[in-house]
Each structure stands twice: as structure tokens, then as C-alpha cells.
Image: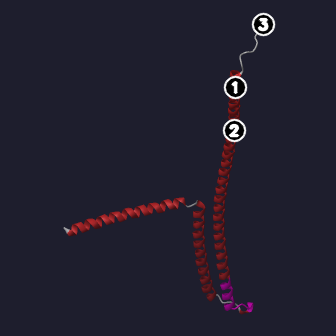
Amino acid sequence: METSSSEEEDGEEKTLEERISKIQRDKIEIVECTVPFSDQLAKLARRERKYLDRLAAEKHNREIEEQKSSSAEIEIPVSNGVTQSELNRVEFENFELTQSSGQAAKQSEELSGKIIESETSAAAAQHEVDRMIKLWKESQAQLSATRQRLSDVHERLTVAEQVTAATQQRALQESDNSEQLQLTPKHQPTGQTRFF
């Protein structure tokens, strides 16, 4: 009984581990898809340069070995003044120059990759700056429109206050006039009153 439950638990753990591994592989694939093409191209170019350098070094070493074996067979005349050690020194210098050339090419490739990366990041930064400028211009336009609406509302409010004040003033004057009319005596002569 205990053995079968232990086997079931082991099976469940194995299943869970497999699922986790699959999720992790999927995540890695998604991340690799988001890497810019310029980065991938630069990485591939560096790898290619590395393999080309190794291949060139292998070929050069083989040629030197072949030259050494053939020069051992060929007898160098003493009359030309070149000794075997001088020949070996020149071959070694040639090999060093080839290596230096390969390293310079590798450095050039790395610099090229860095330039591509910096151009890509500069383009991204410029895109972000352009986006921020666009947002700033939109906010300025909205601010201007809001100020215009506020000015219009303020103007209407001022007019409304003036109309209200004028209406109140007129009502007050009419009220004063009606009070004065009520207070004045009615004994004023009319057209029918006669004087003797």
C-alpha cells in the first residue's frame, strides 16, 4: 500500500516537473522572440567571426606544418644567405600577423555589433522622445481648449452677474417709486375743480 502511494506521488511530481519544464521552455522561446533582430544578427555575426578565425588559424597551422615538412625535404642553398632559423622566424611573424589580423577583424565585428546596438537604442530613445513630444503637444492643446472654455464661462458669468445686478437695481427703483406714489397726497387739483 505504501509503495503504491509513494509511486503515485513520484509520478505526480514527475508530471509536475515536466509541466514546469515545458512552461519554462515556452517562456524562453517567447523571450527569444522579443529580442530585436539586430541583436540576433550581431550575435550570429560574432559566432561566425569566431568560427572563421578558428578555421583560418587551423588552415594556417596546417600550411606551416606542410611548409616545415617540405622545407625539411628541400635543401636551402647556402648562397642566398637565408638560414632555417630565419625562415622559421619569418613564418612565426607571418603567423602572428595573421592572428593579429583575425583579432582586428573580430574587434571590428564587435564594434559593428555595438554600433548596431547603440543605433537601435538611439532609435528607440528617439521614438520615446517623439512620443513624449506628441503627448506634450496634445496636453497643451487640451490645456488651451480648457482655458478657452473657462474664459467663455467666466465671460457668461460676468454678463449674468451684471444682468442680475441690473434687474435687482430696477426692481429696487420700481419698489421705491411705488412707495413714493403711495405716500403722495391725493388732493391735487383736477381739471374739474373751480376757483372762485
- Per the rendered image, the range of residues in magenta is 79-93
In what element is the residue under mark 3? loop
What amino acid type should be assigned to the residue bearing mark 3? Arg
Q: Which residue is mark 3?
A: 194
Point out residue 65 in the picture as x, y percentages from the top left corner.
59, 83
In what element is the residue under mark 2? helix
Residue farthest along the bottom direction in this orientation: 78
Q: Which residue is mark 1?
A: 174
What amino acid type should be assigned to the residue bearing mark 2? Asp
Point out residue 6 in the picture as x, y percentages from the top left corner.
25, 68
Spatial separation of the CA atoms under disc 2 and disc 3: 66 Å
Q: Residues within 10 Å of mark 3 (few under 14, many from 20)?
A: few
What quarter of the picture does the N terminus occupy? bottom left
User: 144 or 101: which is nearer to us?
Assistant: 144
Residue 25 magenta: no
Q: How many marks?
A: 3
Name above or below for residue 13 compared with residue 193: below
Of the two numbered discs 1 and 3 on the same chain, state the one appearing first in sequence: 1
What amino acid type should be assigned to the residue bearing mark 1? Glu
Point out residue 133 in the picture as x, y percentages from the top left corner.
68, 53
Q: Which residue is mark 2?
A: 152
Residue 89 magenta: yes
Displayed quadrant of residue 21: bottom left
Spatial separation of the CA atoms under disc 1 and disc 2: 33 Å
User: 184 or 23: which is nearer to us?
Assistant: 184
Q: Tell me the colour scheme of the image.
A: secondary structure
